Image (cartoon, helix red, strand yellow):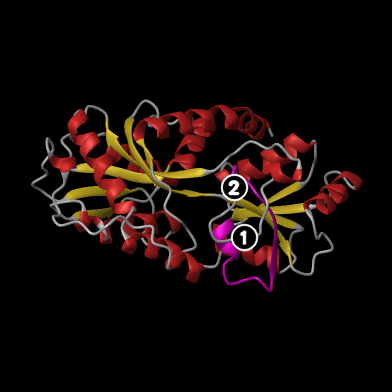
């Protein structure tokens, strides 16, 4: 499905007659809701927050304000959010896979399990395996065969050691019993450029990085249990017979510990409503992403599974 077709799907709920909904039967915020994003403005995670805030008036009676607090791989902002007053005035929206992996690698004081209450997932960042369009590897099996023939020789790119693209790639290699040299780059754009330029043999980067580069990149596999909403032609690893850990990064809104249940439920309901708004859907589509709402209880289950899948991979990375 291309982006234009997706934009014209009628996914949004019917227009609401009032901006105040049943979500606020018990929680009625009277001040702007601050959402801390622990990354710089303009980045991938920040774009989710901006889209959420732009469409928030459909579900919230007060403005939603994005507050960027970058630093220390997301830990600076997460620490501030964890220490905020739990009164419904402050939440955090972050790449929860990255937060989980940072905790596993660095044993930080904040983590998504003991420092916050998961409110809702609004989307998900998913890793894919890409090669240059002129690569001799036309299929995943071709690439696997080449790695098997020369263990430890082929080079692969990712966006930083310990990040979820790195862990997802290492999870694939571990599951298939393969060895290759990892080469970290700064950011998805630089990683994509390295793949296109042939500096590496393949790369593990977000599937949305392929948008607009169909003539320069070939995407061989997706780390997911379902195909991407836009790049529907890309098969998952599982479809091709490779059972790899599903390392991804859900984009999640969290509340500080101690936030009242009615506030958490009210915000969860508001977020669900926002993610059904056509404006939010369109904004995400422009960035090559699709809304993926999950309530807080389901988010907790997803993150626990992610932690358990990632822990042995991270342990191996830490020992290198």
> Of the residues under marks 1 and 2, which one precedes in the sequence?
2
Neighbour tally class for label 2: few under 14, some 14-19, many 20 plus, Cα within 10 Å? many
The residue segment tinted magenta is 207-226
Q: Quadrant of the N terminus?
A: bottom right
Q: Circle 1 sits in a helix, a strand or a loop, which is it?
A: helix
Q: Is residue 173 left or right of residue 213?
A: right
Seen as rendered, the residue at the extreme left is: 30
Note whether 305 is above or below 250 in the view shown.
above
Magenta segment includes 211: yes
Relative to 238, say whether 305 is above or below.
above
Q: Which mark is residue 202?
A: none
SS for dot 2 = helix
Residue at the image position 27 percent from the left and 61 percent from the top: 54
When the figure is inspected, residue 266 is found, relative to residue 71, above or below; the finding is above
Quarter of the view holding residue 293:
top left
- Residue tagged by mark 1? 191
- Across and down, in percent, residue 62 comes to 13, 53
Residue 17 in magenta? no
Q: Residue at x 87, y 44 (%)?
A: 148
Which quadrant does the C terminus fall into?
top right
Is residue 276 shown above or below 108? below
Q: Are marks 1 and 2 in contact (CB under 8 Å)?
A: yes
Which residue is at 81% across, 52% downward?
A: 143
Q: Distance of mark 1 from mark 2, alpha carbons?
A: 11 Å
Circle 2 is placed at which residue position?
165
Of residues 61 and 178, the one nearer the viewer is: 61
CA neighbours of label 1 inside 10 A, class few (<14), some (14 to 19), many (20+): many
């Amino acid at each position: 499905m291309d982006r234009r077709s997706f934009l014209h799907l009628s996914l949004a709920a019917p227009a609401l007659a009032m901006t105040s909904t049943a979500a606020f039967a018990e929680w009625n915020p009277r001040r702007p809701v601050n959402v801390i994003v622990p990354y710089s403005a303009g980045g991938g995670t920040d774009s989710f927050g901006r889209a959420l805030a732009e469409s928030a008036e459909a579900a919230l009676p007060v403005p939603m304000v994005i507050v960027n607090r970058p630093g220390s791989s997301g830990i600076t902002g997460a620490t501030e959010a964890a220490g905020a007053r739990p009164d419904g005035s402050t939440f955090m929206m972050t790449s929860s896979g990255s937060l989980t992996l940072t905790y596993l690698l660095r044993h930080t004081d904040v983590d998504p399990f003991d420092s916050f209450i998961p409110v809702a997932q609004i989307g998900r960042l998913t890793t894919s395996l890409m090669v240059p369009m002129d690569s001799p590897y036309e299929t995943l099996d071709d690439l696997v065969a080449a790695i098997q023939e020369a263990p430890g020789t082929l080079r692969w790119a990712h966006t930083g050691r310990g990040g979820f693209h790195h862990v997802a790639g290492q999870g694939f290699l571990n599951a298939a019993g393969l060895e290759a040299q990892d080469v970290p780059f700064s950011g998805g754009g630089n990683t994509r450029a390295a793949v296109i330029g042939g500096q590496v043999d393949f790369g593990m980067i977000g599937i949305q990085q392929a948008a607009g580069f169909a003539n320069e990149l070939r995407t061989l596999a997706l780390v997911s249990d379902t195909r991407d909403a836009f790049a529907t032609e890309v098969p998952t690893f599982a479809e091709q017979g490779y059972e790899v850990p599903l390392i991804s990064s859900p984009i999640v809104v969290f509340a500080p510990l101690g936030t009242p249940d009615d506030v958490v439920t009210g915000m969860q309901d508001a977020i669900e409503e926002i993610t059904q708004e056509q404006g939010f859907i369109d904004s995400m589509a422009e960035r090559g992403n699709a809304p993926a709402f999950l309530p807080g209880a389901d988010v907790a289950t997803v993150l626990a599974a992610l932690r358990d899948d990632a822990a042995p991979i991270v342990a191996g990375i830490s020992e290198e």
